Amino acid sequence: MRKKTIQLDYDFEDFDSVKRWKRELTRRGINGGLSENTWKSVTYWIVKLLKHSRKTPDELITEAAKDNELAESRLADVFSWCKNDGLNENSCIIGIYGTLRGFYSHNKIDTRNWHSPKTKPKEVDQTDANYPLFSVNQNNRKLTLNKSLLRDFLKSLNRRDEVIALCLISSGLDIGDLIKLNLEFVRNQDNHKRLFLSNFRNKTGEWIKTFFSIESTNALRKYIREKRFNADDSEPIFVSSIREKRNRVDSASIATNFRIAQQRLGIYLSQGKQGPLRPKRLRKVFRTACQIAAVGDDMARIFMGQKSQSSKIYLAKSREELEIFYEMVEPFITLYSEISDDTELSKLKQQHHEEKEELRQHLQIFATKFQNLEKRVALITSHLS
């Protein structure tokens, strides 16, 4: 069901509590910014709260400072109201107990003990289970990529979207981050067999360092030679159409095309239901491949731009060091050309780098101890003199 637009007879952004909220969202946003989509969601849910409570934003914060339980109950009332109005329950939980709760917490209201309903299992989980992207190899009991399904799916796409799907699978990128790449990203790496991306993830602001497989790199370069050969480096790789050569394709169009391709395969979905071969799920193929390849969670988070303090140490690794780990994953995300999976060689490479890292840490410890010893000697010498 589409969200209904509710209008207020005043501008809620004029109130101090909302200004404070907006400043905090901006400060904590990606590169100190606030995306249009984030503020659109904020607007939708805060207007719901204001309409239902019949109070201004500042009045709600004043009320919450005096009666914390009353503020919590207001969210529960809005939640029931929205559900009765026909809104999706999981969307209400995210909007009310995520977005609106943030309105209070950013205004110094303690919401740590507020109760939040649990989201229900998504229908799409059952759909995904019906169309697994990995199957169990009966010989070694390991997961293997469902290449036949994915190949059939790629054949049902146009050339541009086929390349996009290959890139999503092989890099673990979000669709939004992928379609924002310009031609210079590819053309500036002609001397490398795999494309390498080091950038900030649009959704979270986390640093992402990942590669495109040899297979997807070749497909991407071929696509550019055939379809974007006369475009400037500053132009997008993927455009909305051949006629609109400068207009960047949007994620909604890609999602629609993916749904149409699924229908060609006989996967029919009712309106508004997510398909098993959506862009977000293709990205998760990469995550599963990392687990199969025994690449550690910290390294996988670096490849996918996921938040983790423990993975920060890997950010300092060079392109060459990271590529060794990526080579361990690549055989499990390759759809067409067969890449030999030399497990023993991969293990030796990983062991070498782990030993090298351990040696570096020991040297750092010895250097610190030596510096401390020098300081003590200097201190004793100064006392003796």
Image: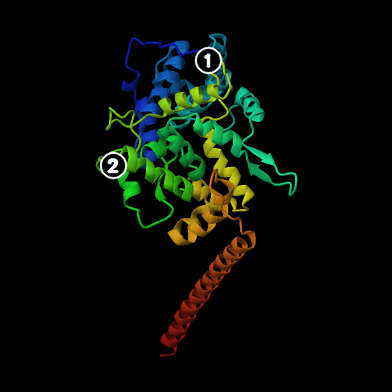
The mark nearer the N terminus, 2 or 1, is: 2
In this view, the residue in front, 382 or 308, is 308
Q: Position of residue 178 (x, y in %)?
A: 41, 39
Q: Position of residue 215 (x, y in %)?
A: 48, 47
**Residue 378 visible:** yes
At x 49% / y 74%, what residue is drawn? Answer: 368
Comparing labels 2 and 1, the label whose residue is closer to the camera: 2
At x 55% / y 20%, what residue is drawn? Answer: 273
**Residue 306 visible:** no
In this view, the residue in front, 105 or 321, is 321
Amino acid type, label 2:
Phe
Q: Position of residue 218 (x, y in %)?
A: 42, 47
- Label 1: which residue? 271
Q: Residues within 10 Å of mark 1 (few under 14, many from 20)?
A: few
- Label 2: which residue? 229
Position of residue 138 in the picture relative to residue 176 (left or right): right
In this view, the residue in front, 259 or 379, is 259
